[in-house]
Amino acid sequence: MDMTVLPKRLKILMVFRVAFASLLLGTYRIFDIGYYKQQYTDGIPYLIVFLYLLTILYSLFINRVKNVKAFAYLQLTLDTIAGTILISLTGGIESWFSFMLLLTVIASAIIIDKKAGYVIATISSILYGLLIDLQFYRILSVTYTPDIEEKDFFYNIFSHISAFYLTAVMTGYLSSRLEKASISLGQRDSDLRDLTLFNTELIESLPTGLLTTDITGRILSFNRAAKEITGINNAEIVSKNLTELFPFTAGTDKKERMEGTIINNNEIRVIGLTLSGITDNKGSKKGYICIFQDITRLKNLENELKLKETLAAIGEMSANMAHEIRNPLASLRGSVEMLKERALNRDQSQKLMGIALSEMDRLNKIITDFLTYSKPKPPELTRFSMESLLNEIIDMLKNAYDKRSDIVIRREFRDNIEIVADPHKLRQVFLNLGVNAIESMQDGGELTIEARKERDNIVVSFQDTGAGISPENLHQIFYPFFTTKDKGTGLGLAIAYRIIEEHRGKINVRSRPGHGSVFEVVLPVETGYFQSKGYSNEYPKDKIKQKDNNIINYNSLVSSST
């Protein structure tokens, strides 16, 4: 048997002993039941006191004894002796309390084991048989009815001994079966807990969001990944409907696969969702299981690939177009210069030719910029200080816009960062971003230029408080020839994007109309190393957090609002 439960069983036995002494023997004494027939009923109160004292002693030593099983045998043996004394005090062969020995046998088999039942049955048989024999031979002065003959004494002893052993056999059998069932049940309970824990941990450890609902769509369970993807905990979501969590599932016929968007912490996320039914063993549908993932990044990569293919086609077409335009442009310039030398109406001719030459120069500049975009030169890499380059950019902006007293330029450089890149190309990028920021603040404002290092990347941001970019334009700002300016060519940001791509970097844009824009340039510290190894544009995930309602992430060039 499990010895760890034996002290608990002995405590139950002690409670039972006190209850017996108080209830059964106490009422027997109080109501004078059978007192007119018995000789030694005055000894019952002493027996009650004796049982109380034994119980007190047991309670004092039960937590101190080392051999609990021997202590249990001692208690049961003393209980057998106390029962025999009670029988002798209440008439011996005519006593109403001979059943007490049967209770002791039953208790021994239950509390200890089947073997203990046989041991106590043997002790009970010896003590009871000895008591009846002593009464019969009048060695004990316990009177009995003269009508009781010798054979009655013999049969009484025989029947009680038989009852003791039969009780031990039956109780032992039931006790052993109960013990085995208890052990088996405990093992099954342990296995079930382990299995439940395993299933719970398995579900909680899944990188994919998982939830279950009833047949009406009410959410019943929600794993850890689901909380991270949706930003909602169990207390907020359980008992709500699936359509409250994923509005795009409303009005559907529970399609197996669907996609939609949700907002998590002011960030729009694209969710890919699979919904399937849960059936019982009879095939009846009981609910739904929903498995979903945040596929925003995957969508960004898909759109990035599409955009690169588009830009490649545009670049090739534009290069051909520029080549075709430039040849007649040279002839046109020569003809205009010849016309400029004529003597007829010289002032008008010179003015006309000056305008023509100016426009041709402007056209030539557009073509030159477009060729720079479509056929860029490889960057000339060198190690330089990013702080020095940005200070130079700030000085150039201040000189160019020295009459704009309503513009404040702030610099936030956390440390002096060195980078391996092409300083001339990056100067072109940063100057373009700075000019665009200042020109977006027609009524004045603040431009903050920040540089910081994040692991293996350098992040340079230009944050303005200007008009911002409308959502419909946000997708197009890096396309060639797209511009919202009256005199802009629309190639500045396209060239900036191409330069950053050459450096294996990316540009993140956050903007909201009326609240300004933030352009973040992310560059690897050792650009030359990546290029020399021929690596593709791959960087640590989740480097730049997107935190606005209108956001576009280049190289992804995809609106990923937050």
Image (spheres, rainbow, N blue to C red):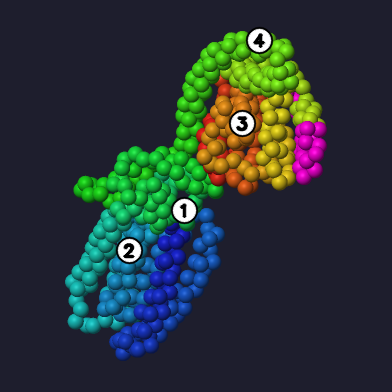
Residue at image mark 2: 105
- Between the residue at mark 4 and the residue at mark 2, the CA separation in whole angstroms equals 129 Å
Mark 3 residue type:
Ile
When asked about the image quadrant of residue 159, the answer is bottom left
Q: Secondary structure at mark 3?
A: strand
Which of pointers 1 and 2 lies earlier in the amino acid sequence?
A: 2
Q: Could you tell me if residue 78 is visible in this image?
A: no
Question: Which residues fall within the magenta stretch?
Answer: 397-421
Residue topped by disc 4: 334
Residue at disc 1, secondary structure: helix
> Mark 4 or mark 2: which comes first in sequence?
2
Disc ID at residue 234: 1
Q: Residues within 10 Å of mark 4 (few under 14, many from 20)?
A: few
To which quarter of the image does residue 73 belong?
bottom left
- Find the distance from the CA under tag 1 to the CA under tag 4: 77 Å
Residue type indicated by callout 4: Gly
Q: Disc 3 or 1, which lies upstream in sequence?
A: 1
Crowding around mark 3 (Cα neighbors within 10 Å: few <14, some 14 to 19, many 20+) is: many
- For residue 136, which quarter of the picture? bottom left
> Which mark's residue is nearer the viewer, 3 or 1?
3
Q: Could you tell me residue 449's position as x and y percent?
A: 73, 37
Residue at the image point whose x is 70% and y is 25% from the top: 428
Name which residue lies at 73% across and 13% down.
343
| Disc 1 residue crowd, few under 14, some 14–19, many 20+, Cα 10 Å | some
- Of residues 191 and 197, the one nearer the viewer is 197
Q: Amino acid at mark 2?
A: Val
Residue 511 rendering spot, x and y as whole percentages: 60, 41
Horizontal and vertical percent position of residue 130 = 32, 68
Of circles 1 and 2, which is in front? Answer: 1
Checking the image for residue 507, the label placed there is 3
